[in-house]
């Protein structure tokens, strides 16, 4: 079956630090990969995605590269801000007829000034 | 032990029917959600309940009605189903809206 494993967290960093949140996956077939973000008091939002190997998704300074050889999709940001404090979910979808998302368990990120 | 479980996993029904999707969480959380996943994998929040009270009610048709009999359950009832209701619906729960949410496996609804 399909599964997503991500850093357990919580992760606490100082402002302007470098961020990495690890995500690895197992999937039958060729998945599309996603990062979702949940800001405090809000619902989930799509942050970025990549649909094939070596694609790089990017948004709001965040990046993640689809690495088929290591089955990974690690989320990175060069300089985090307090406003990046949120919960981050890695997810995959295997599109055999539009299959649904499979989520990781989420990683809580807290940025301190 | 499944933390957030929703039933059924798959639901195929005809236009005009009324159907319900059930969600139960055994995590002791006080907040539960319903999300709709569209064909582009965007997740749109539909409802959020905290301690059985409606907190978030996004713009969804009145045909969608959430029901929370207790903190551990948040069911989604849909009247007069339409073709456009076909989607995957995710239930989730968290301890307050500040903590991370745990997701169910999703219910794929197909209206024919």
Image (spheres, coloured by chain):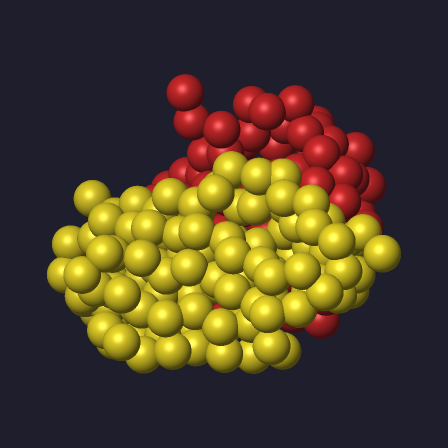
**Up/down of B2 relative to B102, above or below:** above
**Up/down of B81 relative to A11, above or below:** below
Q: At 49% across and 73% down in the image, what residue appears?
A: A63
| A54 relative to A69 in the view: left or right | right
Say which quarter of the image contains residue B59: bottom right
Q: Would residue B28 be visible to someone looking at this image?
A: yes
**Up/down of A50 relative to B57, above or below:** below
Q: How many marks?
A: 0
| B11 relative to A106 in the view: left or right | left
The quarter of the rendered structure image containing the C terminus of chain A is bottom right
| B70 relative to A67 in the view: left or right | right
Q: At 43% across and 45% down in the image, what residue appears?
A: A6
Q: Colour of chain A?
A: yellow
Q: In this view of the protein, which residue sits in the foreground, B3 or A59?
A: A59
Residue found farthest to the right? A113
Pinpoint residue B73: horizontal percent, then vertical percent. 61, 32
Q: Would residue B36 be visible to someone looking at this image?
A: no
């Amino acid at each position: 079956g399909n599964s997503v494993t991500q850093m357990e967290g919580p992760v606490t960093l100082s402002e302007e630090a470098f961020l990495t949140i690890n995500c690895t996956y197992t999937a039958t077939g060729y998945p599309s990969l996603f990062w979702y973000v949940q800001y405090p008091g809000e619902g989930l939002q799509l942050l970025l995605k990549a649909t094939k190997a070596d694609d790089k998704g990017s948004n709001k300074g965040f990046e993640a590269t689809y690495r088929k050889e290591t089955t990974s999709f690690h989320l990175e940001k060069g300089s985090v801000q307090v406003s990046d404090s949120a919960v981050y979910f890695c997810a995959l979808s295997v599109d055999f007829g539009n299959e649904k998302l499979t989520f990781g368990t989420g990683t809580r990120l807290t940025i301190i000034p | 032990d499944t933390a957030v479980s929703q039933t059924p996993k798959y639901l195929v029904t005809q236009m005009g029917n009324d159907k319900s999707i059930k969600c139960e969480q055994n995590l002791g959380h006080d907040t539960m959600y319903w999300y709709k996943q569209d064909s582009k994998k965007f997740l749109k929040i539909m409802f959020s309940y905290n301690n059985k009270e409606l907190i978030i009610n996004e713009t969804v048709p009145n045909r969608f009605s959430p029901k929370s009999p207790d903190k551990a359950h948040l069911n989604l009832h849909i009247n007069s189903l339409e073709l456009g209701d076909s989607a995957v619906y995710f239930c989730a729960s968290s301890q307050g809206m500040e903590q991370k949410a745990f997701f169910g496996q999703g219910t794929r609804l197909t209206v024919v």
